[in-house]
Image (cartoon, rainbow, N blue to C red):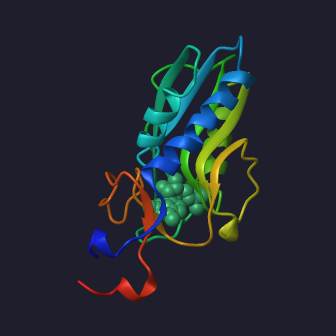
Amino acid sequence: MPNAESLEVLYSEKVIAERIRILGAEITQNYQGKELILVCVLKGAFPFLADLCRAIDMDVRIEFLGVSSYGAGTKSTGVVRITQDLAHPIKDKHVLLIEDIVDTGLTLRYILDNLTTRNPSSIGICTLLDKPANRRVEVEVDYSGFTIPDHFVIGYGMDLAESYRNLPYIGYFPPETLGKD
Ligand code: 5GP
């Protein structure tokens, strides 16, 4: 596993916090008077949810949806398995999916199709990172923190083989550092 010291930092803790403050204000404004459920897609979105929900200045419900992609490695297969379902119904509620990163879009497509059958009033998408270079299916992202180039990023919830999720910033290993250690 490469050493975190060789990471190239994309977004510092401070930059992430400032962006989330703005996203929270937008969400607060757009969902005024509505019953909003934030659905955190596990595992990668948990730090984002924790910070974002505290930047939203209205009452919200929090739900967790555990998903895992079949297949190993760093490429999405599009075959998704629900490892932990929502604890409560979402019928007639406004749902905002909280994601760490949208890459191919396959995971979100699966989640959207699944949750739509439960008849919520609306389903929105809020992702911290959007990586449009590899998109394979169209998904309409309503709130996006940052649009990033085609790097495999880690930190702030995102992992490499389950490591690095607890880094407070987001970065990537430059290609020359991979294969070492
Ligand atoms: P998609 O189905 O859109 O290709 O990928 C969605 C999921 O794949 C994300 O929620 C995340 O868990 C994982 N993923 C996609 N790109 C990256 C990345 O650059 N770094 C990490 N750590 N995970 C990623």
**Residue 5, percent from left and from top:** 29, 71
Residue at image x 41%, y 55%? 169
Foreground residue among 155 and 98: 155
Q: Is residue 89 above or below residue 166?
A: above
Q: Is residue 11 above or below residue 73?
A: above
Quarter holding the C terminus is bottom left
Residue 30 is left or right of residue 3, and the answer is: right
Residue at image x 32%, y 87%? 179
**Residue 31, percent from left and from top:** 71, 21
Q: Is residue 58 above or below residue 84?
A: above
Residue at image x 76%, y 47%? 140
**Residue 159, percent from left and from top:** 38, 59
Quarter holding the N terminus is bottom left
Residue 126 is left or right of residue 169, and the answer is: right
Residue at image x 66%, y 23%? 28
The residue sitting at the top extreme is 33
| Residue 28 in sight here | yes
Foreground residue among 106 and 144: 144
The residue sitting at the left extreme is 181
Number of numbered discs: 0
Foreground residue among 74 and 84: 74
Residue 96 is left or right of residue 33, and the answer is: left
| Residue 117 in sight here | no
**Residue 107, percent from left and from top:** 58, 53
Image-quadrant location for residue 104: bottom right
Image-quadrant location for residue 3: bottom left
Q: Is residue 118 above or below residue 130?
A: above
